[in-house]
Amino acid sequence: MNASSAQAARSREDILSQVLDEAPVRPSWIANHFAVIAVAWQVVLDFFTVMVALGVAYKGYRLLGLGQRVYYPRNEYLLMSVAVACGFILLMERYGLYRPGSSLLHIRETGALLRAAFLSTAVFFTVGYLFLQFFPSRWVVGLAFTLLLTLVLAQRVAFYGVLRRLHLLGYGVDRVLIYGCSPAGVQVFRKLAQSPRSGLVPVAFVDDDPSARGTQVSESAYTHRKSLVVVGTGEELEEILTRLHISRVILADGISGDSKFEQIKEVCDKHDVQLSFVPLQYRLDQHLVNYQDMDGLMMGEISRIRESSVYRVTKRLLDLVLGGLMLLVGAPVMAIIAAAIWITDGRPALFSQERIGQFGKTFRMFKFRTMYRDAPAYAPTPRDRDDPRITPLGRFLRRTSLDELPQLFNVMLGEMSLVGPRPEMPFIVAQYTPAQRQRLMAKPGITGLWQISADRAFEIHENIDYDLYYIRNRSLLLDVAILLHTLIFAIRGVGAF
């Protein structure tokens, strides 16, 4: 072996050792039965969280002096609480929340949680009223629903965090090797990293480009929570599968030919490794494709995106009611912010800018001014907290998203919605590709999937998968789920610059 070959071998050995150090193998009984144990713990936690929520609701009803402060016999209330908890768990199972896998940013799970919380409290308190002569106060029912939803959501967020951490330590996972260090491969990495319940943990990349060896690929430019290294090429696949104890290979890129695919499949079969791939035929966006299994033949069809009249009307009512309440409650805060801007940097306090709305219509979007008065009105959005265009007060407003409060006026005028894709400036929309123009099918919103994702550090139009997911799956329940996630996002103080 010559010097260069020896150096390459040492480099490959160092890289493989690094991956094993970062993603250790856990061949223990707990690791092998982790999925069952995790589901059991989740059921137990959900049960006791519901019981705590109902107990606190009754105590709060009594201590806060709400309603008539009726006393309910402890045994009857405890029986109803157990019934509600059991019904809640059955509904969660019915909606698939104890199965592997998850949706984008767990939004669909939050929607299912909303349905389960509402139905379990409504049905069982109604049954108690009709058949058990149990007459709960409306205050108790309201507090029970609010606390049940809030506490279970918080508990599940914490549980997902623990689950993700245990997966990173190697417990109960399919160790995934991603074939293809391309934008598609990075997207696979990001989606798997955002779905801890799936049990699919990416440990490394393989790429046919030898120069990519040793390259670090980050999950997200916003959080940098995890990165993977490119460990080698497809020619070294057999050794990599063995050394890294890989249980699944995901082909993120198209393979140059059938013979190459068969070669990869043969290696995976030899080592009992599951082979998966991302359908890339015709380069269609996967959010727009529905698949149907027809006796072993996988048929794909392009879905037609429609917005029902019922949804459009109810969404507008939600915008008017919630937007009006937020304007009413937020008026003092908005007045204080406007005065602070006048004092620190003069007038005007408001900044308006032409944006592109639904179906390409232009409108004037309002915000609190966060940049100096001589900053250009139409320029790329700041991505750095130290951007010299931003005022000291503007940094605070952007970090807390308080600069977007005036957009509630756009909501009341019908130009925007509370939830939807973010509106872009005209010069950016003019450069849209056909795929990116699909964002214009929905009314723009103050918040949305992209706004609460880690990828808000990137340009909006570079992450259209969030908007396409929303446009295809939009519903009133999805909107409420996004609003709940936005509240959590705001409480954590994660804003933009």
Image: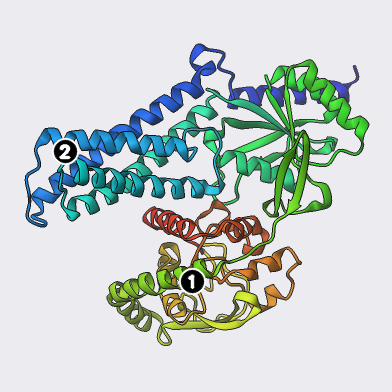
Q: Can residue 383 be seen by looking at this rendering?
A: yes
**What whole-number distance in Å separates the C-alpha atoms at marks 2 and 1?**
41 Å
Circle 1: element type: strand
Q: Residues within 10 Å of mark 1 (few under 14, many from 20)?
A: many
User: Which amino acid lies under the numbered mark 1 shown in the image of this protein?
Assistant: Ser
**Residue occupying image coordinates x 41% and y 87%:** 347
Most extreme residue toward the bottom is 347
Most extreme residue toward the front is 131
x and y percentages locating residue 14 in the rendered image: 71, 24
x and y percentages locating residue 134 in the rendered image: 15, 43
Q: Nearest to the eye among marks 2 and 1: give it.
A: 2
Choose between 111 and 215: the one closer to the eye.
Answer: 111
Please tell me whether residue 369 is drawn above or below residue 226 in the rendered image. Answer: below
User: Which amino acid lies under the numbered mark 2 shown in the image of this protein?
Assistant: Tyr
Circle 2: element type: helix
Residue 493: image tag: none
Q: Residues within 10 Å of mark 2 (few under 14, many from 20)?
A: some
Upstream in the sequence, badge 2 or badge 1?
2
346 vs 301, left or right, is left
Please give the residue where the numbered disc 1 appears in the rendered image: 417
Please tell me whether residue 470 is drawn above or below residue 104 in the rendered image. Answer: below
In which quadrant will I find the N terminus?
Answer: top right
x and y percentages locating residue 168 in the rendered image: 54, 29
Please give the residue where the numbered disc 2 appears in the rendered image: 77
139 vs 119, left or right, is left
117 vs 376, left or right, is left
